[in-house]
Image (cartoon, grey):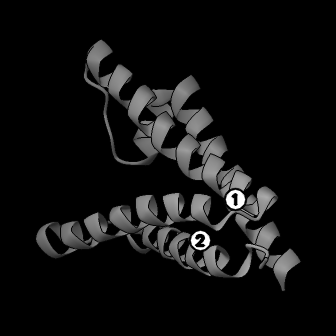
């Protein structure tokens, strides 16, 4: 169980870090995948910086939390993804649906659940 959980956390961590790398190296394509269009240098800079930071912190916390069995690090990702999931829920209620709206919400809900479970289960008891 512990090994499977650590593998799942690490896989999500790799996914998020690679997504962050996509925003860093190709913000136009990565932003487009999220429905974003950069408006000049400022837009590119915002997509490149903000989304890279978000996904690298989320993914890095998953990877380090799984590797070190550190539940506190997993709470960082749980908080980030939980806020993101809540924001999507608000947008869903206010703005309506769009094609495949449930996919990012499913990934975020899974990330929150795994992070919270991992934060309780992974730390070794003294």
x 52%, y 59%: residue: 77
In the rendered picture of this protein, how many numbered marks are placed on residues? 2
Secondary structure under tag 2 reads helix
Contact, mark 2 vs mark 1 (Cβ under 8 Å)? yes
Residue 29: x %, y % from top left: 49, 34
Res 116 → quadrant: bottom right
Residue 119: x %, y % from top left: 62, 73
Looking at the image, residue 115 lies above or below residue 43: below
The answer to whether 35 appears left or right of 121 in the picture is left
Q: CA distance from mark 2 to mark 1?
A: 9 Å
- Categorize mark 1 by other alpha carbons within 10 Å: few (<14), some (14-19), many (20+): many
x 12%, y 70%: residue: 94
Res 19 → quadrant: top right
Taking depth in this image into account, of 120 and 85 the one nearest to the observer is 120
Where is the C terminus found, in terms of image quarters? bottom right
x 64%, y 44%: residue: 17
Residue pointed to by mark 1: 65
Residue 91: x %, y % from top left: 20, 66
Looking at the image, the residue that sits furthest to the left is: 94
Residue pointed to by mark 2: 115
Looking at the image, the residue that sits furthest to the front is: 126
Q: Earlier in the sequence, mark 2 or mark 1?
A: 1
């Amino acid at each position: 169980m512990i090994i499977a959980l650590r593998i799942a956390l690490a896989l999500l961590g790799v996914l998020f870090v690679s997504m962050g790398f996509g925003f860093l190296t190709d913000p136009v394509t990565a932003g487009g995948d999220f429905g974003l269009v950069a408006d000049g240098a400022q837009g590119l800079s915002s997509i490149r910086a903000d989304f890279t930071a978000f996904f690298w912190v989320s993914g890095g916390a998953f990877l380090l939390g799984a590797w070190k069995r550190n539940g506190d690090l997993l709470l960082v990702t749980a908080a980030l993804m939980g806020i993101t999931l809540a924001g999507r829920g608000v947008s869903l209620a206010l703005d309506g649906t769009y094609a495949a709206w449930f996919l990012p919400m499913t990934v975020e809900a899974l990330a929150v659940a795994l992070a919270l479970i991992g934060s309780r289960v992974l730390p070794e008891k003294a």
